[in-house]
Amino acid sequence: MDTSPEWIAVDWTPVRRRAWAMRGDTVLDTVTQVGPVEAARPAEALLGLISVFLSDAPVDVMTCGTLGPVGASVPCEPLSDGAWSVDIGDVRVWLRGVSGLRQKQPVDMMQGDETRVAGFLALNTDWDGVICLPGEHSRWIHVSAGEIVSFQTFMTGVVAATLLDRAVPDARAARVDGVTFSEAVGDAIAKPERVMARVHSIHAEAVLDGLQPEIARARLLGGLIGSELAAARPFWLGQQLAVVGEGELAQLYVDALGAQGAPAALADEPRVTRAGLATAWRTLAAAP
Amino acid sequence: MDTSPEWIAVDWTPVRRRAWAMRGDTVLDTVTQVGPVEAARPAEALLGLISVFLSDAPVDVMTCGTLGPVGASVPCEPLSDGAWSVDIGDVRVWLRGVSGLRQKQPVDMMQGDETRVAGFLALNTDWDGVICLPGEHSRWIHVSAGEIVSFQTFMTGVVAATLLDRAVPDARAARVDGVTFSEAVGDAIAKPERVMARVHSIHAEAVLDGLQPEIARARLLGGLIGSELAAARPFWLGQQLAVVGEGELAQLYVDALGAQGAPAALADEPRVTRAGLATAWRTLAAAP
């Protein structure tokens, strides 16, 4: 059996880079790098990431994320900007990538999630609604008739990591108490302006009263996700919803939405990302 | 002239430690350490901080901050808990400190600001109102008839530093455009739930449209401080106000409050801190 990849899928962000060795839609192998990019030049870092997949034969590489430029403005199709390509000085690698998208008002941008929308639509033909993509940056994307209509990005994950670290470091790895989380989400949606005031109270209860880590983490994450839901209400109210993510964070968003009477389908993010890159590879890599 | 200190004033936090060599209320010398505590034991770190002030003669050291315990619950006088003392194994140093205060509902705590309230009241006899202390943690303290009635702590400074770092790193050291700042404060007070949504928009404008650093920083800080003002409204509305702080951040709080029709007097934080420690030294160090 030939185990060499037909093509390589890459999702590239400043904090995590993943590559999949692919044959059609089948994953042959996976590599992940977490943390800042260490190589001086992006091309060098990319070759380092995918080196275990390379043989003497040339291979297509299709990327999404922050390696490439930001292109078209919404409303537009997720892959409407075509693929960029660049010679990275290695004859084995034909590097192409999906351009990011921008929004004019309110100004916003995405680099990678346009590919996940393409993947979600490839897996769910003719789907209309709102896709929520939780993470360090969480993003709400309104999709209609195959186009991205509008979107909004929140830095909830960045703020949550900092506040867990500074307010309740012992709770960073605690499980989340479900009942407390739902209550905190509800409180935050009702009074979003009070969320930041509550964080130091959680810290003080942890120090003075021995607040349990699973309660502390549930209150902090529930407050921040609830605050995001309050601001993102126009996106999720009365819409068909999908959360594209994985692990605990994605489930927390599904739970938070469900508790507001807004049921969301959960789609596995790595599968959706690969489906988007496969769509890009098939439709864009054939272009000149 | 004898230049050896009569006593040493110390303000101790995990991120900054300051010591003043004092003769009565006069400052003879100052040292500051910024960053995490490096010594393994607090006593060792304290001796390191004040070592330049020490001679063979014994000296009183009066501290506030996170070296000591959290004591009494408000409402109470700022120094009502007496002074703790500890033998740090150096015959030259008689170490005492002001205990922090706690609040039962909503649970909160302070370690250091109780001393600043005592200092402010020593400099402003019979003052009633609300004292705002901006910083990494900002705190609003309601003072009446010489007692701390209630308080609330916000982690605005911590969140601002992280978001500047992640969203607009080029703007970290920019000056703040005043008009933009006031507008951002007003927007945030009107719609506090939208502040977190706006942060990524600032990032996108910086990347895509070359948003000027002084505009980016003004919008980010205005949004976060305005959001804090929205939550702290019961503290500042219709109250006599003082901001105890220094530098740009204190002036931004004064400006933000002023733009809401709530004029605040600005008091120099190091002077207020030393006045509080001097009061503690005179009233508490004499106790057994």
Image: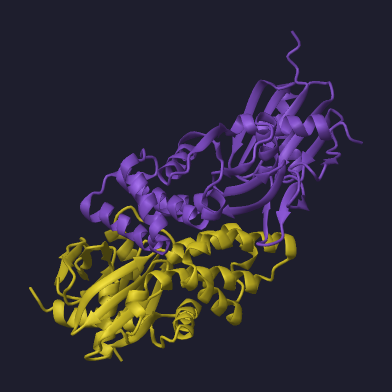
Chain colours: A yellow, B purple
Residue, far left = A288
Observer-nearest residue: A173 or A275?
Answer: A173
Residue positioned 37% across, 61% down in the render: A14
Observer-nearest residue: B239 or B52?
Answer: B239
Residue positioned 42% across, 71% down in the render: A230
Residue, far right = B288
Q: Is residue B210 above or below residue B276?
A: below
Residue positioned 23% across, 67% down in the render: A100
Quarter residue A209 falls in: bottom right
Quarter residue A147 falls in: bottom left
Residue, far top = B1
Quarter of the picture containing the N terminus of chain B is top right
Residue A210: image location, x then y, percent: 73, 66
Residue A12: image location, x then y, percent: 32, 67
Residue positioned 24% across, 72% down in the render: A150
Quarter residue B145 falls in: top right
Residue B40 horizontal side relative to residue B59, left or right = left
